[in-house]
Image (spheres, grey):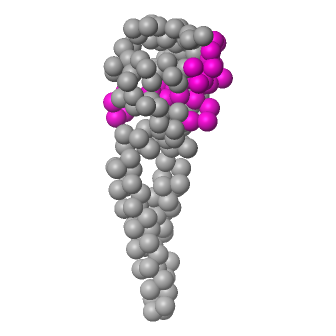
Amino acid sequence: MELTEFQIHSAYDHKALKTMCRVLRKTVRHKRAIAARVFGWLVIAFYALVRVGLLLLGDYSIDFMGVVSALCILFVLSALLFEDDLNAWVASKNLLPGTREADTRFCEDEYIVTTQATQTHMHYENIGVVGETKDSFVFIIGKRHAQQFPKAGLASGTPEQFRDFIAAKTGLSVRYVK
């Protein structure tokens, strides 16, 4: 039995936004993310080498610039380790009022996203990447926009049926993202 219509309820909480940020980072932003991470770790390694060198030379002292440098390195380190959390926090601040929850109905030619604020008719050809995680599906629309659909929010059908339906409608393969 093949379903032709699916309904999914989505809640855009921190976990959902973090999932969307991770899928964006690992798909359409992949090359840029790798370059940024390499640069960040090189900066941290250079800082550590300089500090160790100063310590071995006996010229290590704690001054204002040393404290500022250490705080900058701490900021870079936390950005590297918590990138998706930071991006999700920023995204949560940019959510429009009335868009924290959405009900989406997937039809033959389009899918309709209904929030408290509006109802939007979206076309499958606008989807650039379909990502899947353990708990949800994520549609990537451009380099900065995504939509998340939790598997637990499916009102009818199974995740496998939905995966096949979306792959057929978009002509894209569903990419699994850890």
Residue 36 % position (x, y)? 37, 55
Given residues 100 and 147, the one toward you in this image is 147
Rendered image quadrant of residue 47: bottom left
Could you tell me which quadrant the C terminus lies in? Answer: top right
Q: Is residue 114 visible?
A: no
Residue at x-position 39% and y-position 61%: 38
Q: Say if 121 sits above or below 142 in the image.
A: above
Residue 89 % position (x, y)? 52, 37
Given residues 142 and 67, the one toward you in this image is 142
Segment colored magenta: 133-161
Residue 1 % position (x, y)? 60, 10
Residue 156 belongs to magenta span: yes
Q: Is residue 62 visible?
A: yes
Residue 59 belongs to magenta span: no
Given residues 145 and 99, the one toward you in this image is 145
> In the image, is 9 to the left or to the right of 145?
right
Residue at x-position 42% and y-position 80%: 50
Q: Say if 8 sits above or below 167 in the image.
A: above
Residue at x-position 58% and y-position 29%: 136
> In the image, is 132 to the left or to the right of 168?
right
Rendered image quadrant of residue 37: bottom left
**How many discs mark residues in the rendered view?**
0
Residue at x-position 49% and y-position 48%: 83
Q: Say if 133 sits above or below 31 in the image.
A: above
Farthest residue to the bottom: give it: 57
Residue 6 % position (x, y)? 55, 11
Farthest residue to the front: give it: 1
> In the image, is 105 to the left or to the right of 32?
right
Given residues 144 and 55, the one toward you in this image is 144
